[in-house]
Image (cartoon, helix red, strand yellow):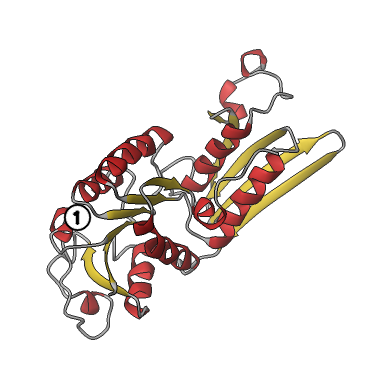
Amino acid sequence: MALRVGVAGATGWTGRAVAEGILASEDLTLAAAVARKPAGQDLGKVFGREPIGLAVDGTVEAALGRKLDVLVDYTHPTAVKAHALAAIERGVAVIVGTSGLTAADYAELDRAARAKGVGVIGSGNFSITANLLQHFAEIAARYVPDWEVFDYAKATKPDVPSGTAQQLAERLGEIGRPASATPIDRTIGPKEARGADIAGTRVHSIRLPSYIIACEAQFGAPDERLTIRHDAGSGAQPYVAGTLLAVRKVRGIKGVIRGLDRLMFGTPTSA
């Protein structure tokens, strides 16, 4: 039986691509689509195609009344946690595609999900290649003791750092903390120039016109440097395959898996 999937943010940049990917799949059913402005309209017409017999819901609560198996959220950082908790309370598995949640937020979701026996997969980026960046960076951090993270995006992106960069920094923090740089309290000049401290990693967010989105981890050792970087294009299609992979796997887990790479490769062991 096809999984019944709801997409919150179904008319947004990524949400629409994911919704269309579900409509095109043979093993998934788009059972709900959430968007405020076109609420009540047929989603097919909203997408500029023939009607598909699915009215857009104005709220996640309304969508959860459609007996979903999985809720995919591509909405807004201020709303996603509440959406996820509402789904978990109803026994619905969750895919968190929206950036902005912290490690503490995910810990709260994990407790709620385990109590209800459902799965949550959250990732700062559902692109397969972006998750290869994270996987390779974790390997590098076990052998190269110093690193910093650089986060590039368009000037109007409101959240800093990006979900990709934040998740990467928190993961690297699980491995260790760079020690070679001058401690922040001993630097001369504005402390902010050294970037934000996220789990012991310095993270620098650059917001300028002409950037789409990119994330870069730089590793340094005496007389050598390694750069691992992911650049995204202007379309949302790269995020669809990873999101649908998570949708198909999430009902087989309990609690939170944070990072599509952990779903792909498991948790790395120590070197």
Taking depth in this image into account, of 271 and 75 the one nearest to the observer is 271
In this figure, which residue is indicated by the disc labeled 1?
60
Residue 251 vs residue 270: left or right? left
Image spot of residue 246 (x, y percent): 42, 60
Amino acid at pointer 1 = Val
Quadrant in the picture for residue 20: bottom left
Quadrant the C terminus occupies: top right
Residue most toward the right?
Answer: 223
Q: Quadrant of the N terminus?
A: bottom left
Q: Secondary structure at mark 1?
A: helix
Vertical side of 188 occupied by 59: above or below: below
Question: Who is closer to the viewer here, 128 or 209?
Answer: 128
Q: Is residue 156 left or right of residue 177?
A: left
* Side of 70 where 131 appears, left or right: right
> Which residue shows up at 38% across the image and 39% down it?
106
- Residue 32 seen: yes
Residue 87, x across and y down, in percent:
23, 51
The location of residue 23, given as percent across then percent down, is: 32, 77
Q: Residues within 10 Å of mark 1 (few under 14, many from 20)?
A: many
- Vertical placement of residue 12 versus 102, above or below: below
Q: Nearer the viewer, residue 18 or 77?
A: 18
In the displayed image of the protein, which residue is found farthest to the top?
Answer: 186
